[in-house]
Image: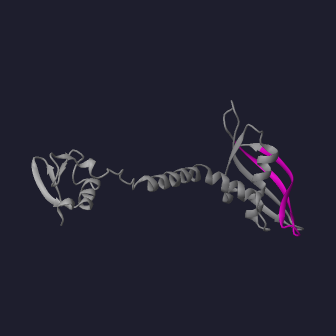
Amino acid sequence: MRSSEVFYLHIHGEQRGPYTIQHIDHLLNSGLINEDALFWREGLEQWQAVTDLVERRQPKDRWKWPVIILSVLLGLGSMGYLFGPVAFEGWREIYQHHYSQEAAYWRARDAVRTYCVPKDGFVVFEPFPAAEVQLGDESRAVAVVGGTLHLPGVSPRVTAWRVQLRFNKGTREWSPTEAAELLTR
């Protein structure tokens, strides 16, 4: 090593070295020495701050992108947890393309929401096994679906609706022909 490339460090009252500029840069930016360390080389009259020799770089924020990605995933997961079941049930109510009891049940639920429940109310339906669905001749069905009707300012009440449906074989879609509340249980 030539003397102009050899540096000594003064750290915590001790002199250490010799070091190269690259070595000192690594020591400072990896956190092995502090910014208050001093350096000296031949030709200097006194010790000087190591930051006069090498620049202190900001450490890369290793956690920035993982934290951003995790935050987005948690946000999406929360949205899915809160709104996923409602969106999935809404999708099932609208998109039924089979001539089956279960498909008729889901379309009957949509008919109840659309034609029988006031705009400021909502229904928590009983599951499919509790419904009565009868498939008839000529692509018709009658579904009796029960649930709890919630209206503002009124106690929730358990009730049922009778929905008549027709299945169009050409478009493979269910259409309600009549929907009415039966009774309050």
Judging from the image, the colouring scheme is one colour
For residue 22, side relative to residue 176 (left or right): left
x 83%, y 61%: residue: 174
Does residue 55 show up magenta in the picture?
no
Give the number of marks.
0
Which residue lies most toward the front here?
43
Tell me where residue 4 appears, x and y as whole percent.
20, 59
Tell me where residue 14 appears, x and y as whole percent.
9, 50
x 56%, y 53%: residue: 76
Nearer-the-camera pick, 104 or 159: 104
Q: Quadrant of residue 99?
A: bottom right
Does residue 174 show up magenta in the picture?
yes
x 39%, y 56%: residue: 62
Quadrant where the image shows the C terminus: top right
Quadrant where the image shows the N terminus: bottom left
Which residue lies most toward the top here?
153
Tell me where residue 107 appears, x and y as whole percent.
78, 57
Nearer-the-camera pick, 127 or 55: 55
Which residue lies most toward the left here?
14
User: Main SS type for the magenta part?
Assistant: strand
Stretch of the chain drawn in magenta: 158-182
Tell me where residue 132 appears, x and y as whole percent.
74, 58
